[in-house]
Amino acid sequence: MTPKQIELLETTWRSVATLGAAAPRLFYDRLFETDPSTKHLFARVDMDTQGAKLLDALGCVVESASQIDRITVFLEELGRRHVAYGVEDHHYDSVGAALLWTLEQGLGVGFTDEVREAWTAAYGHVAGIMRTAAAVHMQPSASAAA
């Protein structure tokens, strides 16, 4: 990510964070609307708690954007945990689309093409790390194959 993209993440995140619990509600409503296959993943989840976790995770990504390597291990573990929750690879695309839509709703005219590109780059990097860890986690181990 470029320094300008990181700056855009930081400034727009401050604006989105002021929405509080409304941002995760927008996000999950949109996710469930556009990809109903995700709804069952949250059937036994307290959505207020889940929303707070989402905001924390996004805040962590924004804070670490200039040194994303600092949270790579965290993201890999998150990707592996999501396998156990039933998350499939295609869900990452749905989540990315719902995230961008939520940011657009929250930022209004502040959601410029540059902002979209910055968030797309950040999410793409994060999702890439998580997807790779999930895929490796799902592969049969060499000892199991023997």
Image (tube, rainbow, N blue to C red):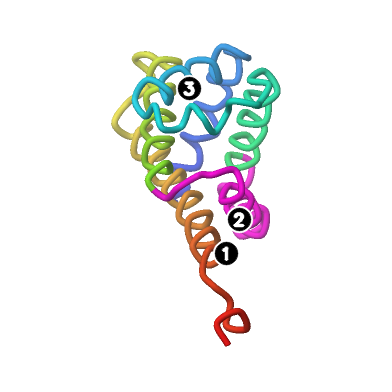
Label 2 to label 3: alpha-carbon separation: 22 Å
Please state the horizontal and vertical placement of residue 60, each as a whole percent of the image: 65, 40
Please state the horizontal and vertical placement of residue 73, each as a whole percent of the image: 66, 59
Displayed quadrant of residue 31: top left
* Mark 2, residue position: 80
Label 1 to label 3: alpha-carbon separation: 27 Å
Please state the horizontal and vertical placement of residue 127, each as a whole percent of the image: 47, 49
Disc 2 element: helix
Which amino acid lies under the numbered mark 1 shown in the image of this protein?
Answer: His
**Label 1–label 3 contact, CB within 8 A:** no
Query: Image point 37% across, 14% down: which residue?
Result: 108
In this picture, is 47 found above or below 56? above
Task: Tell me the magenta residue range.
Answer: 63-89
Q: Magenta segment: does it hold 136?
A: no
Give whichever of 44, 10 is nearer the camera: 44
Label 2 to label 1: alpha-carbon separation: 6 Å
Query: Image point 51% across, 69% down: which residue?
Result: 139
**Label 2–label 1 contact, CB within 8 A:** yes
Lateral position of residue 146 relative to residue 118, left or right = right
In this picture, is 37 found above or below 108? below
Question: Which residue extends farthest bottom?
Answer: 146
Mark closest to the chain's N terminus, 2 or 3: 3
Disc 3 element: helix
* Mark 1, residue position: 137
* Mark 3, residue position: 27
Q: Magenta segment: does it hold 81?
A: yes
In this picture, is 26 found above or below 57? above
Which amino acid lies under the numbered mark 2 shown in the image of this protein?
Answer: Arg
Mark closest to the chain's N terminus, 1 or 3: 3
Which amino acid lies under the numbered mark 3 shown in the image of this protein?
Answer: Phe
